[in-house]
Image (cartoon, helix red, strand yellow):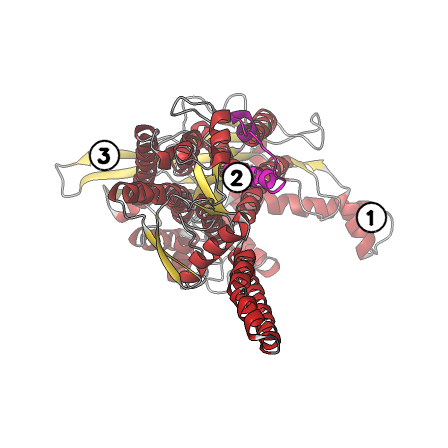
């Protein structure tokens, strides 16, 4: 796996150690590799790191380069007091260095005989003051100490010395090849020759990268050394328990040689029974960075509880209204409202309300698979619930308009249960087909969405939601189109019947219900989109929206019916009717001769046949109106008012003509004889009376319109009719 490196420079004298430790702590890295100069810098750095929680914590593990070999083990092994800062900081440290010269991978030992000459030469140089001074003139030295970075009188970094030796040999071989017999070299030819030169050196096969000129990493053997603590009891002395550290090889990287292809290596080898002991005292591989502190946004338990309360309330209200409908199913108020569709309405609201339960399901208590099932349940329950509830409302208004259209053509029609159930069944089956195909082909899945990341790019904040992918989008659009069309058609049918004056004003309440649901959805849906990344807001708004729609449907359909039922029991339905200046008492029964129609119930609650009921409606008998909601007029208030004004104008003109004719006759009588005129004048009252009777003889339909219009005008242009509200 790739390793992210974070470089920090440290002064040779360690003056910027506080800044270095602060930067290390901020970086949060827990594997630290240091290349330092001497023991003093090592000790100072580790002491400061321990004081600031960057060493000795059990989480931070320090590794060093080859210069660390003389820090803990030299001519004299260092001792540390147990549990002292340096003991805890150095515990479990390791070194990653080029393998010592002459290392034998098969015997896991060092063969100093192979490089005896090189080692003796290095020791000779270190012990020679003259040679050290010469090297200082040709090699870079520490500006503060004046010493060579790899060799002092006390310490020799053999790895650095080995690389310097091999680099010198490489330069000499390349110069000989590039110069040939000439004593002059060009820079380009010298570099081109050098990167192509290869030889077996002390540390391995010396081969350079053809592009950069640096040495290939797989040509060097590396070893990992682990410094293991060893306690020694000095309780009999003043020191107490002391600890020293002993190195041991745990891993070895074997470099390639001439027998191995250039792009390969022999790889890392772990030594048996030599597990690396980390700072926490175990061989368990620790994390390189702190474990992520992930925050998961689950749905708040309080919001879940409130959502369950809304679902329980919806279920209770729907069952209560269904029970009330069944108990009073033979009452004329309930029977006229078609109990079957009221049951269907309650069932649709129960199914739609059940969506609340699946919408507040998350992966806190349910598995991801269970949450995915809940996501699909959201679509199933909402689609089927909406289709049942709104198609039932559509069927009721469609049935009313179908009867009215037939009555306008003076045709007799019988609306059966199959006629009214057809739209409901068609919409339900259409939803069912789309849902089945979507679930089988592209079901909705519950996914974890990450919204926050730490400095290492790891997710630290997430929440779960249903993923409506592009593959599922066509099915969702189809469901929205089907159910949206049902709602719009239901609103259209209710709008067509808006001027219908019926006994219980059911069409108007259906229209108001549909409009209120549409407004609630228009407000709630954009809020759901805005609350996309907040599980609490999404759960609350979606649950409240479903609860609101169910409550609107149930309350606006059933509460008026309960009110009409109670009024029929108390006799409070009697109203004052004012027609053309005359007042009269009117109840639900229409006036004699009035044209009245009724919507028969599709079920025979009184045991009679619907056809018999329809024939009774034509005769206008009160007994025949025991079932169904009576329609009192088919005209709008504006049409009735215009007809009343027209009739008044006609009566006024007729009266004026009669008066003019009477004046003309009187004038003629004055010119005749007294006896003849007396007998003629005696016939004038009879003529006036006959004319008045002729003009006042109006058809039954005209008088019904006048009565209806008078009732509407008496209520200041409202929608009240003789027996109920206009629908």
Q: Badge 1: few (under 14), some or many (20 or more) residues near its Cα, within 10 Å? A: many
Q: Nearer the viewer, residue 293 or 11?
A: 293
Mark earlier in primary sequence (1, 3): 1
Q: Which residue is mark 1?
A: 178
Chain part drawn in magenta:
396-421
Query: Is residue 307 rendered magenta in the image?
Result: no
Q: Which residue is mark 3?
A: 232
Q: Are marks 2 and 1 in contact (CB under 8 Å)?
A: no
| 10 Å crowding of disc 3: few (<14), some (14-19), many (20+) | some
Instruction: Kindly identify which numbered label has been placed on residue 424.
Output: none
Does the image show residue 232? yes
Q: Position of residue 72 (x, y in %)?
A: 36, 43
Residue 484: horizontal and vertical position, in percent? 57, 42
The number of numbered discs placed on residues in the rendered structure image is: 3
- The residue singled out by tag 2 in the image is 400
Residue at the image point whose x is 39% and y is 51% from the top: 42
Position of 151 with respect to 49 (left or right) is: right
Whichever of callouts 2 and 1 sits on the residue coming sooner in the sequence is 1
């Amino acid at each position: 796996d790739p390793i992210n490196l974070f470089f920090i420079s440290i002064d040779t004298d360690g003056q910027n150690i506080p800044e270095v430790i602060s930067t290390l702590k901020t970086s949060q890295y827990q594997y630290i590799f240091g290349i330092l100069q001497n023991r003093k810098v090592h000790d100072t750095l580790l002491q400061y790191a321990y004081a600031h929680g960057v060493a000795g914590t059990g989480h931070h593990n320090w590794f060093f380069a080859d210069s660390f070999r003389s820090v803990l083990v030299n001519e004299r092994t260092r001792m540390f007091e147990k549990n002292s800062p340096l003991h805890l900081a150095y515990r479990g440290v390791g070194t990653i260095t080029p393998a010592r010269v002459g290392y034998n991978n098969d015997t896991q030992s060092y063969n100093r005989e192979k490089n005896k000459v090189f080692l003796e030469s290095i020791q000779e140089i270190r012990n020679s003051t003259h040679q050290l001074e010469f090297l200082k003139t040709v090699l870079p030295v520490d500006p503060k100490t004046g010493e060579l970075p790899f060799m002092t009188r006390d310490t020799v970094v053999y790895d650095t010395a080995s690389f310097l030796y091999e680099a010198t040999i490489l330069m000499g071989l390349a110069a000989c090849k590039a110069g040939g017999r000439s004593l002059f070299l060009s820079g380009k030819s010298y570099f081109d020759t050098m990167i192509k030169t290869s030889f077996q050196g002390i540390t391995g096969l010396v081969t350079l990268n053809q592009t950069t000129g640096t040495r290939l990493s797989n040509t060097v053997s590396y070893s990992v050394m682990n410094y293991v603590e060893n306690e020694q009891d000095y309780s009999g002395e003043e020191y107490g328990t002391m600890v020293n550290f002993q190195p041991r090889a745990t891993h070895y990287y074997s470099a390639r040689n001439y027998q191995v292809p250039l792009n390969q290596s022999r790889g890392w080898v772990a030594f048996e029974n030599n597990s690396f002991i980390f700072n926490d005292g175990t061989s368990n591989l620790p994390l390189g960075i702190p474990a992520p502190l992930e925050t998961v946004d689950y749905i708040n338990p309080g919001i879940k509880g409130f959502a369950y309360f809304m679902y329980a309330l919806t279920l209770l209200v729907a069952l209560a209204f269904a029970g009330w409908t069944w108990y009073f199913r033979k009452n004329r108020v309930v029977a006229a409202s078609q109990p079957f569709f009221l049951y269907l309405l309650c069932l649709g609201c129960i199914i739609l309300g059940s969506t609340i339960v699946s919408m507040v399901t998350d992966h806190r208590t349910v598995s991801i698979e269970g949450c995915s099932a809940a996501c699909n349940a959201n679509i199933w329950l909402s689609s089927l619930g909406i289709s049942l509830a709104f198609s039932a409302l559509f069927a009721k208004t469609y049935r009313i308009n179908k009867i009215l259209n037939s009555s306008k053509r003076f045709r007799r029609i019988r609306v059966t249960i199959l006629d009214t159930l057809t739209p409901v069944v068609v919409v339900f089956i259409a939803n069912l087909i789309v849902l089945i195909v979507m679930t089988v082909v592209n079901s909705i899945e519950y996914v974890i969405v990450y919204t926050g990341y730490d400095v290492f790019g790891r997710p630290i904040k997430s929440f779960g939601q249903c993923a409506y992918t592009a593959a599922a989008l066509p099915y969702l659009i189809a469901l929205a189109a089907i159910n949206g069309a049902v709602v719009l058609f239901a609103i259209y049918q209710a709008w067509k019947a808006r001027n219908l004056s019926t006994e219980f004003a059911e069409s108007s309440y259906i229209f108001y219900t549909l409009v209120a649901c549409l407004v609630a959805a228009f407000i709630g849906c954009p809020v759901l989109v805005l609350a996309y990344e907040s599980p609490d807001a999404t759960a609350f708004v979606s649950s409240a929206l479903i609860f609101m729609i169910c409550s609107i449907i149930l309350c606006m359909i059933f509460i008026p019916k309960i009110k009409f039922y109670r009024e029929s029991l108390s006799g409070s339905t009697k109203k004052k009717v004012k027609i053309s200046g005359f007042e009269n008492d009117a109840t639900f029964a229409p006036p004699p001769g009035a044209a009245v129609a009724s919507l028969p119930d599709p079920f025979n609650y009184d045991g009679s046949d619907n056809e018999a009921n329809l024939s009774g409606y034509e005769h206008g008998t009160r007994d025949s109106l025991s079932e169904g909601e009576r329609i009192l007029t088919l005209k709008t208030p504006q049409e009735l008012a215009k007809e009343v004004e027209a009739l008044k104008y006609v009566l006024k003109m007729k009266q004026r003509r009669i008066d003019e004719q009477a004046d003309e006759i009187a004038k003629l009588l004055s010119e005749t004889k007294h006896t003849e005129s007396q007998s003629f004048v005696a016939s004038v009252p009879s003529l006036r009376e006959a004319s008045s009777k002729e003009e006042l003889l109006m058809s039954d339909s005209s008088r019904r319109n006048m009565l209806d219009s008078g009732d509407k005008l008496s209520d200041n242009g409202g929608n009240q009719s003789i027996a109920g509200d206009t629908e």
